[in-house]
Image: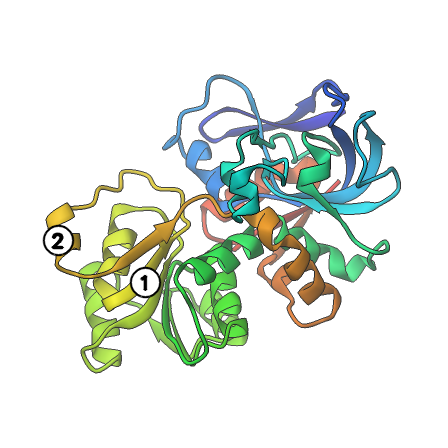
Amino acid sequence: MRATILHRPGDIRFEEREDPKILAPTDAIIRLSATCVCGSDLWPYRGIQEVPGPTPMGHEYCGIVEEVGRDVRTVKPGQFVIGSFFASDNACPHCKAGYHTSCEHREFVVGAQAPLLRVPLADGTLVATSEAPPKELVPSLLATSDVFGTGWFAADAANVKPGSVVAVVGDGAVGLLAILSAKHMGAERIIAMSRHEARQKLAREFGATDIVTERGEEGAARIKELTKGVGADAVLECVGTQESMQQAIGAARPGGFVSYVGVPHGVQLQGQDLFFRHVHLHGGPAPVRHYLPELIDLVVEGKAEPGKVFDLTLPLEQVAEGYRAMDERRAIKTLLQP
């Protein structure tokens, strides 16, 4: 098969690679119905995160089970499934506590920007739908695999409740779906931080009540101004830079909650500054598997349409253009069709 390989920064190729095979009795092989480019894929693409030579890319996926190992019991060939970017056993103490991305046996799922994918720990990682979904639902089901689950975790980790005042730092797919998640959780006011008209429009469609274009200290000050000097009850940091984290912390009220789901790059926190802010911090790799059944139901029942974040659809062989479009901010998120 041909698959997506990153050779060096900016050098994405769609080239021949060996088909994935069952390597462990708990594996499954999936034929992908759709995959996509993630904002976190741009870190190595831009050279900010090093990769050790040619690297298979992609970790968001949904599709039809083709083959399973002899020990797989909960999914079977022919089923439509969605899984998380971390494989987990769904049975260890951390999984039972809802933190599947800290599973004692976790494995990172890689190579999803391809027609076929090997998924380890299939029983604990994959969730099957009751029947094969119609084509129009596939983008939204794909979104549950990562960005919707990550946005949901951002809202959950920040303790969003009915009536909350929420600020979202970041207007990529995760930030936009964090807005959607906060709305579903009953937030009364949602302040989206964005400078891009198309993203602002989608933010409002998902539930944003206010738009702030300022960044850094100015952005935090603007949120304080909008909240009459108090700050937000919950701030959802969905970028992963020093500026975005400081802005998030600065925008929260004393006793407020800050979640961080953007992969951190160069982020350093000052203990003394945090000590006097009384801000709760909670974040990390989103335990998407914990939320998958609930999010799949929201999509299937027509209560959420997270697939709207895909504003560019390309055949898989044009994956390099998908990366360029996102890198140049011509696209929020690229859907790839095998």
> Closer to the camera, 321 or 110?
110
The amino acid type found where label 2 is placed reads Asp
- Residue pictured at 64% horizontal, 53% vertical: 292
The amino acid type found where label 1 is placed reads Phe
Q: Quadrant of the N terminus?
A: top right
Please rate how many residues cluster around mark 2, counting C-alpha atoms within 10 Å: few if below 14, some from 14 to 19, many from 20: few
> Tag 1, which secondary structure?
strand
- The residue that disc 2 covers is 273
Location of residue 172 in the rendering, given as x and y in whole percent from the top left corner: 46, 56
| First of labels 2, 1 by sequence position | 1
Location of residue 32 in the rendering, given as x and y in whole percent from the top left corner: 76, 40
| Residue 208, picture quadrant | bottom left
> Tag 2, which secondary structure?
helix
Is 311 situated above or below 338?
below
Left or right of 88: which side holds 40?
Answer: left
Question: Distance between the Cα atoms at labels 2 and 1?
Answer: 15 Å
Is 104 situated above or below 311?
above
> Closer to the camera, 200 or 23?
23
Q: Quadrant of the C terminus?
A: top right
Give residue 257's mark: 1
Location of residue 305 in the rendering, given as x and y in whole percent from the top left corner: 65, 66
Left or right of 235: which side holds 34?
Answer: right
Q: Are marks 2 and 1 in contact (CB under 8 Å)?
A: no
Is 23 situated above or below 112?
above
**Residue 180 appears in the picture as rendered:** yes
| Residue 300, picture quadrant | bottom right
- Residue pictured at 32% horizontal, 39% vertical: 265
Location of residue 162 in the rendering, given as x and y in whole percent from the top left corner: 46, 78
Please rate how many residues cluster around mark 1, counting C-alpha atoms within 10 Å: few if below 14, some from 14 to 19, many from 20: many
**Residue 219 appears in the picture as rendered:** no
- Residue pictured at 39% horizontal, 62% vertical: 158
